[in-house]
Image (cartoon, coloured by chain):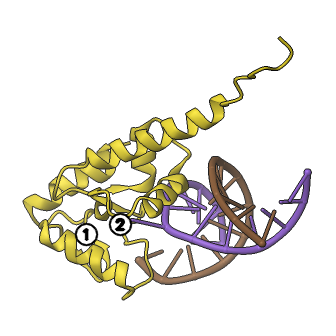
Chain colours: A yellow, B purple, C brown
Amino acid sequence: VQKPKPPRIEAHALECDARERAILEAVRSIPPGQVRSYAAVARAAGWPRHARLVAKVLSRSGSTGLPWHRVLRADGRIAFPESSPAWLEQSRRLLAEGVDVVEGRVRSTHRTAAVSAGLDAALWGAG
DNA sequence: GCGCTGACGCGAT
DNA sequence: CATCGCGCCAGCG
């Protein structure tokens, strides 16, 4: 058989899909009221250096019922430009879950309430 | 194949 | 703390 059907489905493509599924699952597993950094999600998904990919995947998956609003930058700030529609939406959703958000930034390092303790664990303990 | 662009991260300044 | 610079990954012209 010369090349009747060379299985060039490429492990690459499958791997990309696997990455995406793992990432989506990792995001889905974030408990309400808690937040994770893009890097933490990537680590949880098993792909430590793919923080940017997490962002890309999230942008690609629009209304899949995914708790995308629980994913922030490593410094605790919302990744969107301030006052942008998405920015407003994310802070609104986080506040609705009891997350302490001030000016687009999650106060996780400051343990002022029981909620903060949970956030702190989520942000730093995920690593 | 190359360079630019992002919902990024982290150490250095 | 706020910024900068450089590294990382995947998509696209």
| A84 up-or-down from A47: above or below | below
Q: Where is residue A86, by image quadrant?
A: bottom left
Q: Where is mark 2, residue-wise?
A: A76
Q: Earlier in the sequence, mark 2 or mark 1?
A: 2
In this rendering, position of residue A34 left or right of residue A57: left
Residue at the extreme top: A1
The residue closer to the viewer here, A11 or B9, is A11
Q: Which mark is residue A107?
A: 1
The percent coordinates of residue A104 (x first, y second) are 32, 78
- Given contact means CB atoms under 8 Å apart, are the residues at marks 2 and 1 in contact? yes
Tell me where residue A90 appears, x and y as whole percent. Answer: 29, 73
Question: Relative to A84, is A76 above or below?
Answer: above
Is residue A47 visible to the viewer in this orientation of the structure? no
Left or right for A80, reference A33: right
Q: Residue furthest left?
A: A114
From the image, which quarter does the C terminus of chain A lie in? top left
Give the quadrant of residue A98: bottom left
Subunit of mark 1? A
Q: Of A90 and A63, which appears nearest the observer? A: A63
Task: State the residue at coordinates (37%, 71%).
Answer: A77
